[in-house]
Each structure stands twice: as C-alpha cells, then as structure tokens.
Image: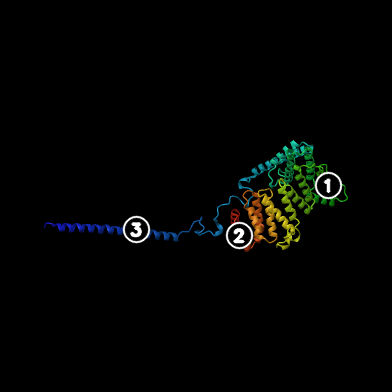
C-alpha cells in the first residue's frame, strides 16, 4: 500500500515525540543519579564527622586537650620569666669559664680606667679626666646593669657610674663658660662625698668598735680616711657660683641630707632643685628622690603597717600623697627615663598598701608589658607572683576595666592569666 501524505506526516510526528520522550527520560535519570550521588556524599560526610576526633590546633574541635593545655593566643615576643635569652646562656663549663675570664678582664680594664680618671681629676688635669671618665662609662656597662659583678669588684659598679656621670656633667660646664677652678673645686667636693662611709660601713664600724672596746689597734695602711659631712659642705661652699654648676651643687647638698637620714629636709631640697632647674639632666633623679624620701616617711612604709598583710586607711597620709604625686610626675615627664621602672614599681606598692589592689596590679602588668626594658618585665613578673594571689574576683573585674584601653598591657594580662 502506498503511503499517503497524511500517513507520512503522522509517522514523523510520532518519531519526534518518541525522541522527546527519550531525551526527557535521560534528563530525569541523570537528575536522579546526581541526587543519589549527593545523598551518598552527605551520608559519608556525616559518618566521617561522627568518627572525627578533632585537631590539636583547634580550640572548638579538640577531643583530648582541656583549655589549660592550649592557647588561642600567638606566642609572646619575649620571655617574661627569664632575664636573659636562652641563646645567651653558656652551654657548658668551658663557656662558663670563658665568660668568667671575660668578666674579669673587663673588670680589670674598667677599674684601671677608674683609678686613672681619679688621679687625673685629683691632679687638676680636666681634659684627661673628662676623656677617662667617658671611657669608663663605656667600658663598665649600662645604667641598669645588675649582674653578679655589679656590686663587687666587677666592671659595673653603680656607685662609681653615678659619680662618673656627675663629674662628666660638671666638666661639661667648661663649655658653658665655667672657670677651670670652679670645676676643680666641685670635683674635690664630689670626691669627698664619694668617700663618705655608707650605712653598711657605719654599721660594721660600730660592731667592730663594740668588739674592740678598750683596745687600741693600729689602722691598716690600706685604709683611706673617710670624709665627713661637714667637710663636704665646706668644700661645696668653696665652689664659685656658675649657672652650669648650680644644679650639681644643689643635688649634692640634697644627697648629703639624704645620707644623714634627714628625710624631710632632703625631700624638700630635691623638690626645690626640680623646680629651679627645669632643664637640668638631674631633674628626673631629683623628682624620683623626692618621691622615695616621702615614701620613707609614710605609714605605708614604716612601722607596723609596712609588714601588715591587710591594707590600711591610715597609710594614705600626706607623705603617701606626696610620694604618689612625685612618682606619677616621673612617669609623665620621663616615660622612657632611667627611673621609670622604679617609679612604676613604687606606685604599685603605694596602691596595694591602701587597698587599691586592681590599681596596684595594673602597674605591675604595665611593667610586664614593657617591650623595651627586660629588667622591667622581670620586676613585673616577680611583683605579680607576690601580689596576684591576694586579688579577689571584684578586683580582677576592675583591673580588666582599667586595662581595656591599653592593648599591649591587656594582651599581656591575658597571657599571664
């Protein structure tokens, strides 16, 4: 039978429909297969997650460490517990011996420079003395030296360094127009002041006198006769007045009163020096000494309250306020000065003695956070070790409020806690 035109058209329509149905079926099949695969992956993930034990670096997903065994904070850039870096510590006995020999050699060189500078200053050779005192300061360490050789026969002897620094300041007055005789007169007064017996020497002398009472021993030829306070004052009176030397003379007078335990007079003298010589390089030390001498007159430092465990309202006396104001002024005017660590440490002490635990701890945490001064960090760490245990929850809440705006200190507090 021959196909009619209508039959051919109908067959084509049927074939087209069949092709569309096949493509639609394949699309549905692919969709169903994709869904099944996705469902399988999700199921496998859930099964894997249920058996996952976590990671040691994760705070949230950790199955075997508690919160005290890991930290969310990055490592500290310094060691708060050690005053020296690990790389600086000798590795064996040979290195210890080598370092000890180096210390001995440095001490020998520094002591020789000191004796030579003393001789030149005593003989009036000002140019040579100035050069030698400068070399001595370079060879003997820095102002914060505190190693085991600091107070013996080592290179770094703080008493000598302070004297050398003062003498160099006096010698610099020559460039300001001071006469050579005026400078020589002051150096003689300073030399007499340095030979005054210290408190320890006076105590030892008193004990020796009690043991040998009634006996007449010949003095040792090596002994040097110490000066007296009256002799120092007499020599200071002989120093011709000059603007470049007035602060030196004023400081030495105040220091002499302090050596004599005339605390109130000495504090007043240091305060006057700071007020009259605003550009003096001794002003920072004068402000610090004013605070320290007032502190020593406060009930917070003397008597039964000094060692009492509990704070006392009576400790907030006039001397406490004067000391507090002086130490705050040191930090405000000399934030990177030589006495910043000592001033902040005493501020912490003053706060604690009157019951302000949060404020006291804040000062110690500021020491611990000092990235420029290793000795300050060590001081802060030791102070916190003594004072932190007495703080209660309310004190710590207030402490966090005080430190909230000080990012580095707050971070240091977080580490320490």
Residue 369 percent across, percent down from the top left: 62, 52
Q: Residue 195 at what x, y percent from top left?
A: 79, 45
User: Foreground: 321 or 387?
Assistant: 321
**Residue at 77%, 47% in the rendered image:** 250
Quarter of the image that includes the C terminus: bottom right
Q: How far apart are marks 2 and 3 (CA)?
A: 57 Å
SS assignment at label 2: helix
Res. 271 visible in picture: yes
Of labels 1 and 2, earlier in sequence is 1
Total count of labels: 3
The tag on residue 230 is 1
Residue in the picture at 77% in, 52% down: 268
* Residue nearest the observer in this picture, 46 or 98: 46
Q: Residue 351 carries which label?
A: none
Labels 1 & 2 near each other (Cβ < 8 A): no
Question: In this rendering, would 134 be left or right of 197?
Answer: left
Mark sitting earlier along the chain (1/3):
3
User: Which tag, 2 or 3, sits closer to the chain's start?
Assistant: 3
Classify mark 2: residues with Cα within 10 Å, few (<14), some (14-19) or many (20+).
few
The residue under label 2 is 401
Report the side of 4 relative to 404 (left or right).
Answer: left
Q: In this rendering, which labeled residue sits more in front, label 2 or label 3?
A: 2
Q: Residue at x 69, y 57 (%)?
A: 349
Q: Where is residue 234 in the image (x, y as percent from the top left)?
A: 83, 45
Which residue is under mark 3?
34
Give the farthest residue toward the left.
Answer: 1
Judged left or right of residue 106, residue 195 is right
Q: Quadrant of residue 413?
A: bottom right
Asked if the residues shown at circle 1 and circle 3 are in contact, with their CB atoms under 8 angstroms apart, the answer is no
In terms of secondary structure, where does tag 3 sit? helix
Front residue of this view, candidates 254 and 409: 254
């Amino acid at each position: 039978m021959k196909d009619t035109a209508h039959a051919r058209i109908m067959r084509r329509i049927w074939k087209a429909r069949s092709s569309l149905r096949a493509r639609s079926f394949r699309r549905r099949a692919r969709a169903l297969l994709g869904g099944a695969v996705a469902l399988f992956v999700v199921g496998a993930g859930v099964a894997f997650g249920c058996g996952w034990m976590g990671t040691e670096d994760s705070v949230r997903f950790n199955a075997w460490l508690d919160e005290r065994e890991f930290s969310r904070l990055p490592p500290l850039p310094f060691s708060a517990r050690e005053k020296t870096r690990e790389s600086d510590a000798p590795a064996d006995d040979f290195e210890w011996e080598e370092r000890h020999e180096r210390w001995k050699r440095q001490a020998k060189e520094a002591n020789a420079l000191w004796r030579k500078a003393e001789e030149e200053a005593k003989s009036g050779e000002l140019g040579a003395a100035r050069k030698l005192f400068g070399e001595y300061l370079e060879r003997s360490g820095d102002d914060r030296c505190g190693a085991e050789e600091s107070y013996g026969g080592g290179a770094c002897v703080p008493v000598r360094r302070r004297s050398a620094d003062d003498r160099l300041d006096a010698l610099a007055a020559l460039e300001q127009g001071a006469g050579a005789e005026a400078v020589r007169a002051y150096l003689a007064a300073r030399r007499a002041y340095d030979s005054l017996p210290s408190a320890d020497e006076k105590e030892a002398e008193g004990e020796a006198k009690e043991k040998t009472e009634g006996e007449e021993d010949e003095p040792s030829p090596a002994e040097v006769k110490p000066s007296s306070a009256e002799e120092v004052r007499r020599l200071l009176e002989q120093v011709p007045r000059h603007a470049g030397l007035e602060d030196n003379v004023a400081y030495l007078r105040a220091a002499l009163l302090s050596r004599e335990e005339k605390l109130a007079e000495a504090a007043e003298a240091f305060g006057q020096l700071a007020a009259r010589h605003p550009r003096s390089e001794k002003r920072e030390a004068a402000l610090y000494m004013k605070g320290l001498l007032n502190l020593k007159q406060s009930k917070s430092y003397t008597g039964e309250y000094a060692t009492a465990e509990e704070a006392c309202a009576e400790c907030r006396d006039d001397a406490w306020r004067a000391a507090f104001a002086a130490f705050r002024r040191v930090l405000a005017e000399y934030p990177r000065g030589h006495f910043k660590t000592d001033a902040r440490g005493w501020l912490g002490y003053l706060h604690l003695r009157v019951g302000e635990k949060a404020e006291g701890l804040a000062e110690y945490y500021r020491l611990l956070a000092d990235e420029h001064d290793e000795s300050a960090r060590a001081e802060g760490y030791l102070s916190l070790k003594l004072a932190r245990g007495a703080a209660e929850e309310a004190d710590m809440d207030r402490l966090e409020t005080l430190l909230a705006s000080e990012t580095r200190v707050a971070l240091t507090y977080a580490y320490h806690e």
